[in-house]
Amino acid sequence: MTPMVEIRGLHKAYGDLKVLKGIDLTVERGQVICIIGPSGSGKSTLLRCVNLLETPTGGQVFVEGEELTHPDVDIDAARRKVGMVFQQFNLFPHLKVLDNVTIAQRRVLKRPKGEAERIARENLAKVGLEDKADSYPAQLSGGQQQRVAIARALAMNPDLMLFDEPTSALDPELVGDVLTVMRKLAQEGMTMLVVTHEMGFARDVADRVVFMDGGVIVEDGPPEQVIGAPRHERTKTFLRRVLDPTHAQEDDLDGAALPAEGA
Amino acid sequence: MSTTATEPAGPARGRTGLSPRQRRKISIAVQYALFVVVLVAVVFIVDWPKIQDTFLDFDNTREMYPDLFTVALKNTIIYTLTAYALGFALGLLVALMRLSSLAVYRAVALLFVEIFRGLPALLTLLIIGYGLPIALGGPVPGGTVGAVALGLGLVAAAYMAETFRAGIQAVPKGQLEAARSLGMSHTRAMFTIVIPQALRIIIPPLTNELVLLFKDSSLVSALGIAATGVELTKIGSDFAINTADSTPFVVAGACYLIITVPLGFAVRRLEARQAKAR
């Protein structure tokens, strides 16, 4: 069976700045992969290359066997199968919640109004926000907005969902609601690629955890291995800092300025 | 200032002279005094009967009605709205060209903006009004209204293009990315997601442009046009010349203010509402 995602020798550079330096990654159907790593490690860029929001400078990306990096690809058609959830939610502020979830169904999939609204309400119910259909995004909390964003992506019936630090912009008490929705989605068998700093989520939900640093994949394996018993020094240092930031050792302090993470 | 005498005793301990509060009170009193002095001077220096005879001799304006409203004000509004419609459509097109990935479109759009923003509006209007009919070998489509709409519309388009561009660029990049990630093409994402949001952002400057255009329609008075095409400034100056009196100017001016003051009020309300929404 063709894998859901296959990435071969992926490179991405902005001028002289090399962000991805040869990534190979295969995601099987139904797998949940969490990508972890320090900021500037290229994990968001990798995710954004999977639906070509970033154009790779080298290598190939296949989704369900179709090469997205082929020059003649119909990228709009290919993206319909790939849902994406952003750190900053990116809901359409001028549209009501219901219209946020129906607009692409209607304009892209050409679903009739009634059908689009029915599917929208189903997905809003799935994220627990059926009663917010007539609200505007600005009237919702960050956690609610992010769940609407998930519903918006799901309404397109994607085969693959990309999550780019979905809880990083949320107040701590709202993180749980979003993670619960994502966990449910994983249990239903959705293929998911998740860039996250939520180690608990990665440990519990991921089939595989990928640790990236400096534009390469340093470690890739089941969570109990990568998070539970990391083999590489870089992974160990990173995990120590993330899991116990208050007790970062003096010698862990990183003097080198890290490049800013792409939002 | 006698009031200072009734103030409580100065602050204690080593402070001499006036406190900042006392100095501020004196400053305000001086400013009021200055205002009164200037007002009194104006009242006494100006020759009021002469002013009234020159600017407020409404006997000289009786002949202006009803043409002032039924022809001149109506034409002013028609010129403004047609020029605005053209400027809006062309301005949006030029803005999209300025943001195009094709260098040639960007260059053409920039050239357009620089030319029509750089030329005096009057000169553009004269070129279109007098030059274009000769170049076309016949009247401009739409006659006088067409020529005026084109002349003023080109200038308005240059300004509005920059406004549209700023508005489009003010929409966060994530909006376009979210729309694209849902499978929308670039064009569809622009028209359903980005431009509607950009328009909301630029409603105040776009309304302001309408006010400017309404006033700039007075430039049409410099074109030799038929009586049916007369607008406010033209009717004002015609009557002013005939009666050797400036009251018709004042009456025409009042007609502009009837429109521009409420519009200006609307702009300020829109801006305030947006400031609150942020």
Image (cartoon, coloured by chain):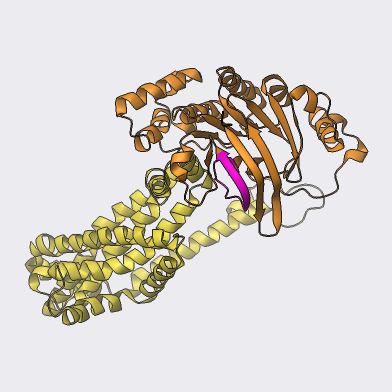
Chain colours: A orange, B yellow
| Quadrant position of residue A201 | top right
Quarter holding the C terminus of chain A is top right
Give the side of residue A25 with respect to residue B260, left or right.
Answer: right
> What is the span of residues highlighted in magenta in the rendered image?
A50-62
Give the side of residue B167 with respect to residue B91, left or right.
Answer: right
Residue B246 part of the magenta segment: no
Nearest the camera: A56 or A119?
A56
| Residue B18, visible in the rendered structure | no
Q: Residue furthest right?
A: A251
Quarter holding the N terminus of chain A is top right
Give the side of residue B14 with respect to residue B35, left or right.
Answer: right
Residue drawn at x 37%, y 34% as measured from the top left: A109
Nearest the camera: A189 or A254?
A189
| Residue B42, visible in the rendered structure | yes
Q: Which x, y percent locates residue A203? A: 73, 22
Q: Which x, y percent locates residue B23? A: 64, 56
Nearest the camera: B206 or A153?
A153
Q: Which x, y percent locates residue A230? A: 83, 29
| Quadrant position of residue A123 | top left
In the displayed structure, A87 sits above or below B122; it is: above
Q: Residue furthest front?
A: A1
Give the side of residue A175 with respect to residue B28, left or right.
Answer: right
Q: Which x, y percent locates residue B33? A: 49, 62
